[in-house]
Image (tube, grey):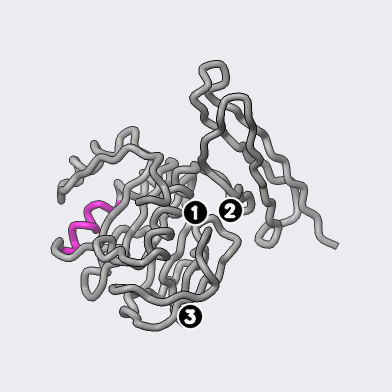
Amino acid sequence: NQYYTSYNLTEINTTSTTALQAALVNKDILLIPENEISSPTAFTAFASVLQSFVANGGSVIFCGSGGSYAQSIFNTGLFSGTYGGYTSSTLSNVNPSHFIATGIPSTFAYQNASYYYNITNVDAVNVIQYSSFSLVAFREIGSGKAILVGYDYYANTSTEAARLIANSVEWAASGSLPNWLRINNLSGNVSTGSSDTLYVTLDASSLASGTHTANITINTNDPLNATVVIPVTFNVSFN
């Protein structure tokens, strides 16, 4: 994907819970393409492994699956809801300030195999919708993330679909930043002797009054400053 290339990719094709658990050791993200052949019941067996992976800081990204295969997503327990269908109508960016929506216009055309869902988790956040249905949505669970991108991974023919998948991977790779803290750019290159500016947004709209803390961790290839940790304290009060 041309929109995000800073990753190391390994692949696994298995219905074995033991093999999946072993494959996730020291991994950050599991990207699951469209399921077109495997029984959704296999994902029921994966549920405990995937839930533990996410709770402990990993991220699972589901690409869209349609028909009865969509149940694969819900059988993991990371999302609850039902399959809605696929659309050939205009899609809406309902969360333009979120990193996943970077580079996505307010409305845009569907691509082949644009799947939408009725997600019932109260903590699910929509990014892209068809009508009132979720096409791209996420949940923050424990220290990790579950992300649903309702596109057929293998029919990824539009700029928006490619960007949404890339943005989801990049955001998932950002670690456990809370939803109230957003950074405009999660990766990049800086030439020797130069600098760059990152913009940080703190959003109190979903927070209770009080003090909220987080750390921004910057990993570099500088052997003298391989990791830089920037503490963030956000005091929220309402009149």
Query: Magenta stretch?
Result: 39-47
- The residue located at (32%, 37%) in the rendering is 8
Task: Give the farthest residue toward the top.
Answer: 224
Label 2 sits on residue: 179
Magenta stretch, main secondary structure class: helix
Give the residue type at disc 2.
Asn
Label 1 sits on residue: 140
- Disc 1 and disc 3: Cα gap in Å? 21 Å
Q: Crowding at label 3, few (<14), some or many (≥20) Cα neighbours within 10 Å?
A: few
Upstream in sequence: badge 1 or badge 3: 3
Q: Do the residues labelled 1 and 2 touch (CB within 8 Å)?
A: yes
Which numbered disc covers residue 197? none
Give the residue type at disc 3.
Ser
- Disc 1 and disc 2: Cα gap in Å? 8 Å
Q: In which quarter of the image is the C terminus?
A: bottom right
Residue 172 in percent (x, y) is at 45, 48
Residue 158 shown left or right of residue 237 in the figure: left
Nearer to us: label 1 or label 3? 3
Q: Do the residues labelled 2 and 3 touch (CB within 8 Å)?
A: no
Residue 11 in percent (x, y) is at 22, 43
Q: Crowding at label 1, few (<14), some or many (≥20) Cα neighbours within 10 Å?
A: many
Give the residue type at disc 1.
Glu
